[in-house]
Amino acid sequence: MSFSRIAFGTLALAAGLALAPHARAADDCKLEISGNDQMQYDKQTLTVPTSCKEVTLTLHHTGKLPRDAMGHNWVLVNAADLNAVASAGMGAGLANDYVAPGDKQVLTHTKTIGGGQTTSVTFPTSILKPGGDYRYLCTFPGHNALMRGTLKFG
Ligand SMILES: [Cu+2]
């Protein structure tokens, strides 16, 4: 191996190391969660690093049932507001994705999707406070008893 090839290899390695932290940070700001036909999310906890300015949450429905029978969404709330948001969402109906229009207790949310579908929502972390007590839930009627989890910020 010639000297120049070794030098090139070292440079490429150095460049890779320099880029890696950025790539990793961007990935940490993308969250994924799935819901299934058994009315379950696949994760009970999601963590957002405080280094993220923006977060994209992608919800996959891995089941087969349609939206009006087994619809799922992902709604982010302060822990204390979970029951109120679930009740208001039920009354809002599928046309509103089971989220009451203008509900200030809803921090952010996705659409309601059916089996085989995917949706996502992007939100700024400025809506979160480090150490805050956050929950996410599915507001499809009856689902939040099982479909809920904790979002940690930092
Ligand atoms: Cu659901």
Image (spheres, rainbow, N blue to C red):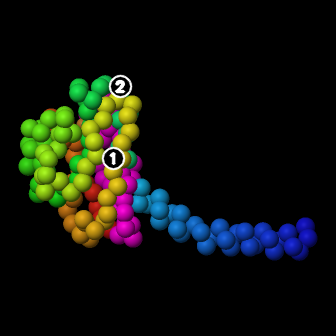
Tell me which corner region of the image, top left, top right, bottom left or bottom right, holds residue 33: top left
Helix, strand or loop at disc 2? Answer: loop
* Residue on which disc 2 sits: 64
The Cα–Cα distance between marks 1 and 2, rounded to whole angstroms, is 19 Å
Q: Is residue 123 left or right of residue 88?
A: right
Q: Nearer the viewer, residue 101 or 69?
A: 101
Q: Is residue 12 above or below residue 106?
A: below
In percent of width and height, residue 83 lies at 10, 48
Residue 52: in magenta span:
yes
The number of discs equals 2
Helix, strand or loop at disc 1? Answer: loop
Q: Is residue 101 above or below residue 131?
A: above
Query: At 90% across and 67% down in the image, what residue appears?
Result: 1
- What range is drawn magenta here? 31-57
* Residue on which disc 1 sits: 43
Q: Is residue 33 left or right of residue 147?
A: right
In percent of width and height, residue 82 lies at 13, 51
Query: At 26% across and 38% down in the image, what residue appears?
Result: 112
Q: What's the amino acid at mark 2?
A: Lys
